[in-house]
Amino acid sequence: MTPTKKTFYGRRRGRPLRELKGQLFASLLPRLTLKCGANDKDLQVGSFFKTPAPEYWLEIGFGGGEHLAAHVRANPQVHFVGSEVFINGVASLLQHLQEEDYDRVRLYPDDVRDFLPRLRAGQFSRIFVMFPDPWPKARHHKRRLLKPPFLAELARLLVPGGVLHIASDHAGYVEEILENIPQVPALSLQGTSDTWTRPFFDGAFPTRYEGKAKAAGRGCSYFELLKK
Ligand SMILES: C[S@@+](CC[C@H](N)C(=O)[O-])C[C@H]1O[C@@H](n2cnc3c(N)ncnc32)[C@H](O)[C@@H]1O
């Protein structure tokens, strides 16, 4: 039986891609897109790459890809998996990558919720969910990604001692995240309400959305959750 795909409510495409982005989308994306069939299960992240790496990091909803590309540059020992539904964002990431990065990055350019259950447990050292869509209207809150079952799925995929990084500038979503975390016993929230007001991960990079939030005067919250 073919598993049912989740309903996705966000934007999948924006303005038509300009020439260079369009070319990269057509030529580079197929090379970087990881192989994952609808019936695959127990997939090993290492199998997506030509060579193994000591650590694998995952970024979910990488937007324009600036944050993912910065980590690729700064962490040459790590191999990265990125997922983004918005094709203009995927094309933007491709522009930020350089030839020498190509063997260390694999992409799932679609809804990450259809991909994660196909992976074997305990594989990522870090997972980033930076500024997930807040869905501010009350009737849309159920669309928010960081519900307890999804947090539990991320916990399943982390190696013991691995870290889930979450950031948000939306007070209501932050409140919900703080309510949901205790429902996932495998994750332990680090820091205190003082440290949550700034990135407390030494190797942190800003995201595009974070820049916009700060320019608009919105405070941001940063959470690190340790896999027990
Ligand atoms: C508010 S944007 C933040 C982008 C980026 N992380 C940043 O901070 O600049 C949220 C992103 O998550 C992506 N997204 C939402 N749900 C997703 C899903 N289920 N799978 C993959 N990407 C998703 C959206 O397309 C959007 O680009």
Image (cartoon, helix red, strand yellow):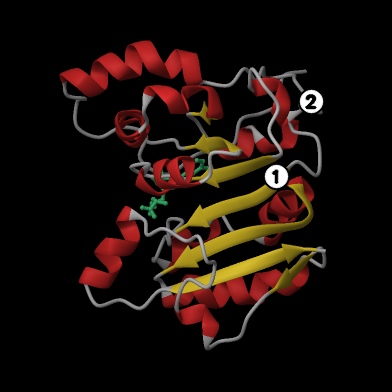
Left or right of 159 in this view: 97: left
Q: Which of the numbered marks, if any, corresponds to residue 124?
A: 1
- Look at the picture and state if 122 lies above or below 194: above
Q: Quadrant of residue 62?
A: top left
Q: Amino acid at mark 2?
A: Lys
* Placement of the C terminus among the 4 image quadrants: bottom right
Left or right of 78 in this view: 110: left
Q: Residue at x 41, y 71 (%)?
A: 170
* Placement of the N terminus among the 4 image quadrants: top right
Judge by depth and name the residue closer to the eye, 10 or 96: 96
Residue identified by numbered label 2? 41
User: CB of residue at label 2: within 8 Å of ligand 1?
Assistant: no
In what element is the residue under mark 1? strand
Q: Amino acid at mark 1?
A: Phe
Left or right of 225 in this view: 98: left
Please say whether residue 143 is visible from this viewpoint.
Answer: no
Q: Quadrant of residue 190?
A: bottom right
Measuring from the top left, give residue 88's x and y in whole percent.
Answer: 30, 33
In what element is the residue under mark 2? loop
